[in-house]
Amino acid sequence: MKKGFQYVFAWSSMVALTGCSALESIPYSPSTSPEAWLTMQPYAEIQIASETILVVQPSTSAIVYLLGVVTILAGLYFFKIRGAEKSRVWWGIALLLWGVGALFAGSSYEAFSYQLKCAGWELCTWTHWLEVAYLIVSLGSVDAMMVAEAYACTIGKWRKWLIRFAWGSFSLYLLLVLVGSFVPVKFLISFEMLLLFAAPNVVIFLILNGRRYRQSRGRMDLALLGVWGWLIVTISAYFLYYVLGISETLWARGIWFTENDVLHIFLIIWMVYIAVVVAPAVKDESISSV
């Protein structure tokens, strides 16, 4: 993961130096002016010295920032109780990455979206480098979970293969995201692309912990099955809320509560569960325990 951090840092620096011109060439669809952007969602004005900063979707921003803080704290808790367990270390890394990603996402998708993607432009742009960084660290988080699973649930060649799979998945995704950012290719830097890469991990987690629990009825595998089951429920709730168009219905009545709020609230519950239930239960698999 150390090399992954170096790649992300180098890429982020390059983007900052080039002014993100490739990303800024992707227009928001449908075409939206800065003025129209502010009519689509609630916002608040904050005065700092002589500068006025518009905070878009204040309630949603608060929820996603809370998710980021809770997740980072959960990650630090794994480090605190890690002992000699590599699986806990990698869970800690996974949650720290997820928490940082949530802060990136909350800043660019919600809180400062107007400043980052609309202010000073004739038409708003579709994305920003903070969103691309969010995609990268989010997939890095899921692949770090794969390494944690490898240490907790496998030994020998299976552990090696799962760790190689995690690194291979992250490396390929990083390459595709960089291509998508600099060419640019919209799909390669989309949330849907992130889900395509993350989904196989979740399937592997379910099969691995499901088989182990069926064989030994272990507390750790039951706790981990709860992790993956709740994640599936969370994503399903997000898409169901989106497909039903509940956000638009509520906003027409002056109530702002979107599918993103549903996602983030469910994820906060998920992170609390991981810290309270999974952290004390997870430990490395060893030959002597098989």
Image (cartoon, rainbow, N blue to C red):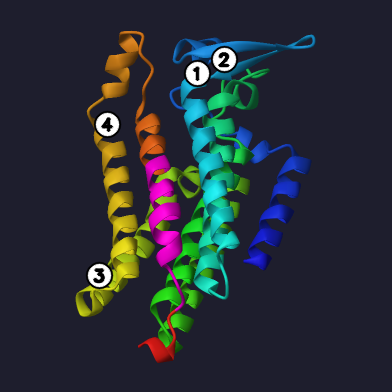
Can you name the residue that lies furthest to the left here?
214
Q: Is residue 57 visible?
A: no
What is the spatial separation of the Cα atoms under label 2 and label 1, in whole angstroms? Answer: 7 Å
- Of tags 4 and 3, which is closer to the observer? 3
Residue 190 shown left or right of residue 26 in the figure: left
**Identity, as a three-letter code, of the amino acid under mark 4:** Tyr
Whether pointer 2 and pointer 3 mark residues with C-beta atoms closer than 8 Å, the reply is no
Q: How many marks?
A: 4
Real-space Cα separation, disc 2 to disc 4, in angstroms = 27 Å
The residue identified by callout 2 is 34
Indicate the secondary structure of the residue bearing disc 4.
helix
> Magenta region's main secondary structure?
helix
Q: Earlier in the sequence, mark 3 or mark 1?
A: 1
Between the C-alphas of marks 4 and 1, the distance is 24 Å
Q: Mark 3 — residue?
A: 210
Q: Which residues are magenta?
A: 268-284
- Residue 32, disc: 1
**In this rendering, position of residue 132 left or right of residue 238:** right
Q: State the quadrant of the C terminus.
A: bottom left
Mark 3 and 1 residues: CB-CB less than 8 Å, in contact?
Answer: no
